[in-house]
């Protein structure tokens, strides 16, 4: 527009050395003003626009319709998955009790048994559980986010029922990266979760943390995470990680949890500990060991884990068509003569046409 106005102002009257008449200039101005130009894009203004599609309009319309249908189906499946997670959250909230919990100071170790609230009958020595109920150890960032690498141990022993049996986190170390965030073990199930807003499985597998084959993890992004040192010796990285050990790492305001789904009605004994494994003169971590006394929670949690075991479905991408940087006809406009060269004083309209010279 600036270029067009510049030459129109310059040629608002006849000029002896220019064979093109003033009316021709106004006619050409109308042609240019009736033309749309593709914008190539630039840093302050963003992406290109008004590019000319080279595909047939019917093909473009059909592809766009197909894309919208696939996108709607994808979003519906995502909503169904979120609905399942929120349903588990509601069930858990209605049947929740804390069996043990404490803050863990920098470099300190707290056993689950010593953090049982006073007056709780039976402590952790004899818990009556039903098939499908859930025990969960949640590790939370503490204070000014002193949350860091945290060593955990958890062993659950059935002392009644069909026959004694023991489930231990230590048994999950071998093949940790291949096992997934849902691990079946002798009819029970272990679940590696983020529990910020209902249970979400840690779906990002990391077979070599920071390039170390001895360390493997399941996480959501960088953190929260559950990871192991599966080597037979200590590994020195950001801190010293003892051999054959399970660790967790909460994220900022994002607790991490390990849940266990009970396989059979009976009495159970629980032992475990939580240790700040990376002292850094901050606030350490805190934990809570919880019991969700609703037999529906376990199967629902396992179903969520089985759903995320399916490879993540990518969000549909919009169709891409070949386009060109081009000029093309827009709405028709005729220019008006600028009286005395002033564009704010329009005169007679000049029809669009080619040169008369």
Image (spheres, rainbow, N blue to C red):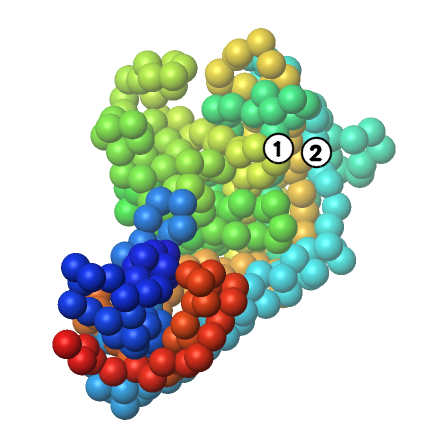
Image coordinates of residue 111 in percent, x first then y, are 62, 24
Label for residue 290?
Answer: none
| Crowd tier of the residue under label 2, counting other residues whose Cα lies within 10 Å: few below 14, some 14–19, many 20 or above | many
Relative side of 79 to 60, left or right: right
Q: What element carries label 1?
A: strand
Q: In the image, is residue 292 above or below residue 35? A: above
Q: How crowded is mark 1: few (under 14 residues within 10 Å), some or many (20 or more)?
A: many
Q: Would you say residue 299 is visible in this rendering? A: no
Among the 4 quarters of the image, the one containing residue 312: bottom left
**Residue 157 percent coordinates (x, y):** 54, 41
Q: What element carries label 2?
A: strand
Residue on which disc 1 sits: 140
Q: Quadrant of the C terminus?
A: bottom left
Residue on which disc 2 sits: 100
Rendered residue at 42%/75% (across/down): 336
Q: Residue at x 25, y 74 (%)?
A: 24
Q: Quadrant of residue 315?
A: bottom left
């Amino acid at each position: 527009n600036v270029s067009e106005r510049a030459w129109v102002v310059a040629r608002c009257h006849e000029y002896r050395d220019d064979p093109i008449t003033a009316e021709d200039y106004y006619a050409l101005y109308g042609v240019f003003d009736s033309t749309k130009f593709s914008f190539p894009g630039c840093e302050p203004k963003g992406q290109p626009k008004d590019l000319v599609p080279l595909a047939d309009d019917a093909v473009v319309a059909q592809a766009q319709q197909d894309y919208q249908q696939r996108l709607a189906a994808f979003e519906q499946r995502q909503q169904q998955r979120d609905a399942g997670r929120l349903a588990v959250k509601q069930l858990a909230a209605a049947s929740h009790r804390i069996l043990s919990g404490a803050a863990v100071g920098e470099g300190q170790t707290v056993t689950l048994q010593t953090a049982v609230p006073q007056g709780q009958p039976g402590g952790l020595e004899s818990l009556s559980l039903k098939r499908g109920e859930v025990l969960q150890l949640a590790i939370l960032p503490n204070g000014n986010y002193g949350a860091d690498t945290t060593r955990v141990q958890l062993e659950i022993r059935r002392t009644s029922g069909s026959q004694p049996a023991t489930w231990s986190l230590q048994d999950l170390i071998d093949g940790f990266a291949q096992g997934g965030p849902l691990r079946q073990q002798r009819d029970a199930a272990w679940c590696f979760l983020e529990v910020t807003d209902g249970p979400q499985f840690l779906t990002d597998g990391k077979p070599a943390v920071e390039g170390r084959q001895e360390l493997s993890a399941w996480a959501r992004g960088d953190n929260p995470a559950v990871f192991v040192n599966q080597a037979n010796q200590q590994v020195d990285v950001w801190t010293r990680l003892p051999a054959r050990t399970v660790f967790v790492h909460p994220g900022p305001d994002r607790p991490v949890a390990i849940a266990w789904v009970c396989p059979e009605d009976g009495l159970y004994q629980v032992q475990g500990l939580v240790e700040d494994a990376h002292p850094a003169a901050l606030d350490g971590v805190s934990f809570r060991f919880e019991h969700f006394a609703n037999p529906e929670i376990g199967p629902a949690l396992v179903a969520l884990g089985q759903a995320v075991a399916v490879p993540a479905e990518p969000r549909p991408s919009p169709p891409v068509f070949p386009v060109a940087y081009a000029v093309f006809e827009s709405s028709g406009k005729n220019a008006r003569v600028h009286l005395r060269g002033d564009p704010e004083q329009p005169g007679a309209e000049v029809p669009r046409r080619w040169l008369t010279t």
